[in-house]
Amino acid sequence: MTGSDKPIVWTISGADCSGGAGIAADIKTGHSLNVETCHLITANTVQNSQQLYSINPVNISLLSEQVDALKEDKKPAVIKIGLIATIDQVQWLITILMALKKENPTLIVVFDPVGSASVGGKLTTLQFSHFRDILPYIDIVTPNLDEAKMLTQSTINDENLLARRLCQYGAKTTIIKGGHSESDKVTDLAYDSLKDQVFRLSSSRVNTHFSHGGGCSFAMAIASYIAQGYLLRDAFTLTKTYIHQGLKAQENKLEQYGAFDQPKMNKLVSSAFPSVESVLNQQYHDLAPFPAIGSFQGEQSLGLYPVVDSVEWLKKLLPLGLEIIQLRLKNLSDEELDAFIMQAVALSKHYKTRLFINDHWQLAIKHGAYGVHIGQEDLLDADLFAINQAGLRLGISTHGCYEFILAKQLNPSYLAIGAIFPTKTKNMTGQIQGIDNLSHILTIADNIPVVAIGGINHLNAEQVWQTGVDAVAVVTAITEADDYQKTVTRLQRCLQPS
């Protein structure tokens, strides 16, 4: 047994005696991101900040012994691969990865295709064809632009096309880092071939020479976040943030070449998070901010936010002095939707409660609802200009830091984040945020109110409230309660100002 509850990441790479790149960077990154790091050294390099002197490959028989030893009690959740020094090591790795993936089909392999040292000089005798041989066993490959062009034997600078070509060689996901571009903005691109999804993240370029080991740290950070259960888009976002913050810590240090400065996972700052580049943000680049959420009752916070599926539930809950409520109607005819939403708006105005209509933004506009709530997956189908021009407030669902940043760039009235805990209403596999991640996301909310939702009840509501959210949304905690009135009172007590 490992004796540790931390996820285990193996790193298979070269040793840099100067301590900046390779195994040294991987260990520092893994420890800073709270994963247990096991290392297998493929080559001992002789280098410093000025020059690469020699590469000394490790025999594959020794590497095999290390794998056998680690398999006994430190099975990996993720393997990160860096320097592959010889052709023999390529064949050995393919054999090892095939066996490990057969034993554990959920094993993720991240590959940083290192070909040369930052200080100059080739680290490996491999040709591009040898790198390609290993790609069918790779889940995430993380080249910079030059490495992507080498692997594809291409002269184009189109990251999207290069990423797709690399996936055609077998990699499931390609992330192309933009640090080698000449732009003042550094844009990284991730292409997930299994879902045919593209994610683009950009941040300002940091002027520093303390970047030795930055590429290694990028791949190891992705591996660490994936090992902790983050979805690709969120692991990518957090990694981009991690690298930017590490570079920023040594900004304007140009007098010498130095090692990348690994930040701590729990100390990522709001200013380090990237911008999301998406079709949605391009479509709404000139969209005015949505109206802020005012107060009917004079309270500073929104507090309890029930989400109900009928007008009957509105009639039950509105007399209880709520600040905000959401109506989520499903599987009704157009005529029924129109009638129910008109009735709901009238009720909410009578009780002076903010009513958000879920999804049906046209009817929310027609009947003058206080606001509309739209799920992330429905944003492209909605007319945000029409909602904005009608003066309605907008709430948006998000499920992790990537979607949170994307939605935040639209300047909504509030952002909902979830699921905080497992929930009965939706399958949120891979998207459970938990208290720690909720706390991290709150650091990038700035002045936009945040609503926590998903699996919240009277047993955990106070814990969620203590993170500093502006509202706590509940569904079945009220609608399936034996006594909904007592449950509302109990939940409201949990959400009192501290």
Image (cartoon, grey):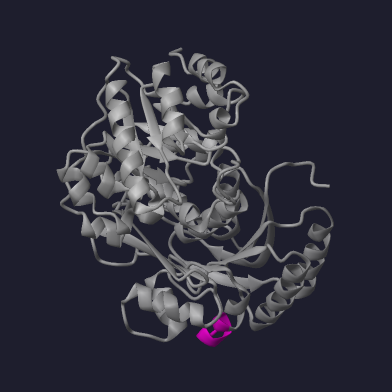
Q: Is residue 382 above or below residue 168?
A: above
For the residue pair 206 and 363, the one nearer the viewer reads as: 363
Q: Note whether residue 348 is visible.
A: yes
Q: Is residue 39 left or right of residue 301?
A: right
Q: How far across and how far down the image is residue 191, in percent?
A: 44, 69
| Magenta-drawn stretch contains 131 | yes
Give the residue drawn at x 79%, y 70%.
Answer: 64
For the residue pair 470 and 278, the one nearer the viewer reads as: 470
For the residue pair 247 and 273, the one nearer the viewer reads as: 273
Q: Is residue 36 above or below residue 136?
A: above
Total labels drawn: 0
| Residue 446: quadrant of the picture | top left
Q: How far across and how far down the image is residue 486, in percent?
A: 56, 16
Q: Is residue 229 left or right of residue 249?
A: right
Q: Note whether residue 469 is visible.
A: no
Q: Is residue 144 above or below residue 230?
A: below
For the residue pair 276 and 335, the one nearer the viewer reads as: 335
Task: Identify the magenta region.
Answer: 125-132
Q: Is residue 407 above or below residue 134?
A: above
Give the residue drawn at x 23%, y 39%.
Answer: 367
Q: Is residue 336 left or right of residue 138?
A: left
Give the residue drawn at x 32%, y 76%.
Answer: 158
Give the residue drawn at x 55%, y 31%.
Answer: 479
Q: How far across and how far down the image is residue 203, in percent?
A: 31, 53
Instruction: Examine the residues drawn in magenta and state their main secondary structure.
Output: helix
| Magenta-drawn stretch contains 107 | no
